[in-house]
Image (cartoon, rainbow, N blue to C red):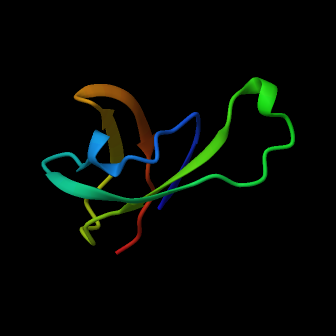
Amino acid sequence: MTLLGVNLSPDLTRYAVRARGDDVVAPAAAIGVRFPLDVDPTDGIESRLDVALPTDSAVRFVEVFVSGRAVGTACLETAP
């Protein structure tokens, strides 16, 4: 899964990622940060965080933490 962001750190050790469902909390992994061509760098550096998720179809949300602080949640639709 790729999450879109602005000014993401390339240091993967700063990220913790969790996959959540109704009765599921599972670790996920930040596996890369990419910086595509940014047409307007004055509004921050566009960034992409690549995340590896568990293959559990009960996962509904992905939560991202940076240096221990919650920074965002993404809704995920899956099919068995």
Front in this rendered view, residue 37 or 59: 37
Q: Position of residue 13 (x, y in %)?
A: 27, 47
Front in this rendered view, residue 26 or 56: 26
Q: Position of residue 59 (x, y in %)?
A: 28, 56
Any part of residue 37 in sight: yes
72 left or right of 25 in image: right
Seen from this angle, which residue lies furthest right?
Answer: 39
Q: Which quadrant is the C terminus positioned in?
A: bottom left
Residue ID at (24%, 49%): 21
Seen from this angle, which residue lies furthest front?
Answer: 11
7 left or right of 21 in image: right
Front in this rendered view, residue 25 or 13: 13
Residue ID at (25%, 67%): 54
Indicate the quadrant where residue 75 lies: top left
Indicate the quadrant where residue 16 lies: top left
Q: Position of residue 68 (x, y in %)?
A: 22, 28
- Number of residue marks: 0
Q: Indicate whether 32 appears above or below 13.
A: below
Residue ID at (16%, 54%): 26
Q: Indicate whether 25 appears above or below 66.
A: below
Q: Position of residue 11 (x, y in %)?
A: 38, 46
Residue ID at (25%, 60%): 58
Q: Indicate whether 10 appears above or below 69.
A: below
79 left or right of 5 in image: left
